[in-house]
Every structure is written in C-alpha cells, then in structure tokens.
Image (cartoon, grey):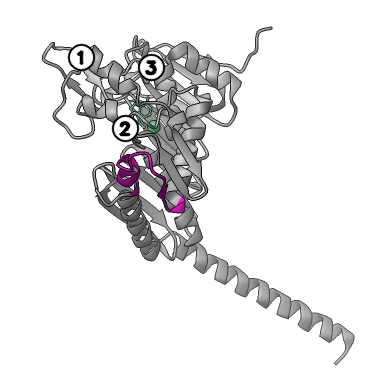
Amino acid sequence: MSSRKRGFLTILLLISAIMLAACKNHQSTKTAAEKGDTAFFAMNTFITLSAYGETVDTALSEAQDKFMELEKLWSVTDEDSEIYKINHSAGKPVAVSDDTKEVIGYALKMAEATDGALEPTLYPVLSAWGFTTGGNRIPDKEELLELLKTVGYEKVMMQGGQICLEERSQLDLGAVGKGYAGDIIAELLRENGILSALLDIGGNIQMIGKKPDGEDWKVALQNPFGDGNYGILSVSDCAVVTSGSYERYFVGEDGHTYGHILDPKTGYPVENDLASVTVIAPEGKRSDALSTALYVMGLDSAIEYWRRNAGFDMILVSEDGDIHITEGCYEQFDLGDASGDIEVYVIEKCFDN
Ligand code: AMP
Ligand code: MG
C-alpha cells in the first residue's frame, strides 16, 4: 500500500473512532438524564429526593436506606439509638459509629466557633418546653435555671471512638443532623454516579451539580410572615438551609408565641430582630449549623460573624420585613412578586479600621 493510501486509511479510521466516541457520548448523556424520585418520612421530617443518571434507582434506594440508618442512630426518643444511649449513660463512655462520632464532633466544633449560639446539649431544656415530645408548656424561670446547669458543649468529651457526656446532660442534634445527613447522602449519590440531584430534607435544600439541562436550580425562599415565598435563589452544588421560629412554635396560655429555637444563655425561645436566616454553603452541615446559630445571634452579630468568617453566604429577613443579603449571593437572588415595599440591603465584606 502506498504511503498516501495508508495516510488516507488512518484518517478514515480516526474519523470512525471519533464518530463512535461521539455516538457513545450521546448515548450516555441521554441515559444520564433519566430521572428518579422518592419521598418518605425519616428523621422526624418529610424527605424528597430527585436525581438524574443511569443508576438512579439503586442510588435512591441506597439513599433511603442510609436515611433510615441515620435516624436509628440519632433519634433522641428511640431507646436503641446511639444518641439515646449517650443521653442515658450516667456519665460513662459510650462506643459509637463513625457517623455519630463525626456529627457530634462537628456540632462541638461549630458550638465553639459560634460561641455557644449553636448548643448541642440543649435537650433537657427543649424537653421542658415540650418541643421534643409535643405537649408544649411554659416552664418557669427557676426550672430553666436549674436545667441550664446541664447545658454546655464542654460537657461532651470525645475519646477515640467513645463519647462521654456529663451526668444529667443530654444531646439533641436537631440543628445539625439533617444538614449532616444531606452531606452523607450527597456523597453516597455521587459515589453511585449521580451528577445532578435535588434533595429536600424537611426544607433543607441540597443540590448535586446543576440541573440536567445545565441551568442552576431555583430555590424558593419561604416568607417567614405568612404563605408564599419572598424570593428565589438560582444556585448549584450547594446547600440552602433556613432557620426561624415560624417553622415550629406554639401559642402559650398567655397568648404569646414560643418558637423552637432557644437562646442557650437564657433557655427561652429566641426573640430578636430576625424573622429568618438562610445560609448558602457548599456543605449541608455548615448551612444547617450556621442558620440556627446566626438566628440565635440576631442581625448585627450575624453580619459581624459573616464578615469574620469565610465560606458561606446568607440572607437575613428582619422582623420589620427587610432583607439583608451578602454580596456573594446577591446576583443569584430575585425578589418574588410580593416585593411591595421590602427594602433589600447588600452586606459587604468591608472592614473598618
Ligand atoms: P434548625 O431547624 O436547624 O434551626 O434547628 C432547630 C432545632 O434544633 C430545634 O427544633 C431544636 O431541636 C434544636 N435547637 C433549638 N435551639 C438550638 C440551639 N440554640 N442550638 C442547637 N440546637 C437548637
Ligand atoms: Mg440548623
């Protein structure tokens, strides 16, 4: 064969190879867009997962199993759970799984980082208000002062794979568990080949990648004063988590409204100048921990915290209905139809000397 003919044949083979590869790619993008959904109740909340990819059915079924497993480990009421065992250990060390060790370790780290605004040992006080079991009541001040003696993240010790909690103290992972679970599930889905997914874990929204069409996900932000949404965020590959008293509360015999997020310093439900806090961060655990902690801090301290700490953005809705949004997510935010006379303030990372 002449060298010209050989050259021609090589080019032909190359073109065929490229066409075959293109065909294969085309096939895989087609199957990668296969959608699966699942909805179930776990960890005391309603969970819906939507994912796209060839392996979506097995991935979602594994995700649901994992949620059930985490619920069994972290429930405060299930006598077989690891958290229950720690809470009833009378000060003795308890061996726990890696997942439990890690979520507790993270909660302790964030408790310290937020100067105790996030407080994982609030369970006795939450119980006194009836937030853990239903049957809400208003405890008196003396009762709260007595219970507050059992509260403090420094009362939890981690020794290797064991957790040691001071006698009478009790853990509640309500403020970080769902976010942490979101990270574990997102990782599990990724390992199963899922490149695009939307997880709604009781209002915690966590996303893997972008939508299959390459667009950002649209996340609606709930109006803390009533029905509907006050805005839409266009985001991808992150977790959007909101905290506010409006999510769970009871009206006492005195006609006053008591919310489920407590100020760990007083033992009373938070009542400050914030109606809701939404945090946007790459990880669910960070968004979840911070949304609760920043809500406890109030408007000015939350802004100060954001200026001193990198790695997240936030949207604060104040009690007077204004929106304070950090510069990092302002471009991705759209006010809803109900904008009316809402003022929007952009928080900048300026440092005054
Ligand atoms: P979240 O909805 O993530 O803001 O978490 C609120 C839940 O965390 C409550 O329902 C309680 O179970 C628990 N909790 C309430 N106040 C605090 C607090 N200051 N720190 C940690 N957990 C809290
Ligand atoms: Mg939280």
The residue at 48%/25% (across/down) is: 314
Mark 3 or mark 2, which is nearer to you? 2
- Residue 140: numbered disc: 1
Answer with mark 1 or mark 3, whichever residue precedes in sequence: 1
CA gap, disc 1 and disc 2:
19 Å
Q: Over which residues does the magenta segment extend?
A: 82-98
Q: Specify the amino acid type for callout 1.
A: Asp
Establish if 18 lies above or below 344: below
Judged left or right of residue 249, residue 279 is right
CA gap, disc 3 and disc 2:
18 Å
Per the image, the residue denoted by label 2 is 168
Q: Specify the amino acid type for callout 3.
A: Lys
The residue at 28%/25% (across/down) is: 125
Instruction: Provide the secondary structure element on which disc 2 rests.
Output: loop
Q: Residues within 10 Å of mark 2 (few under 14, many from 20)?
A: some
Residue 177 location (% of width, % of height): 38, 41
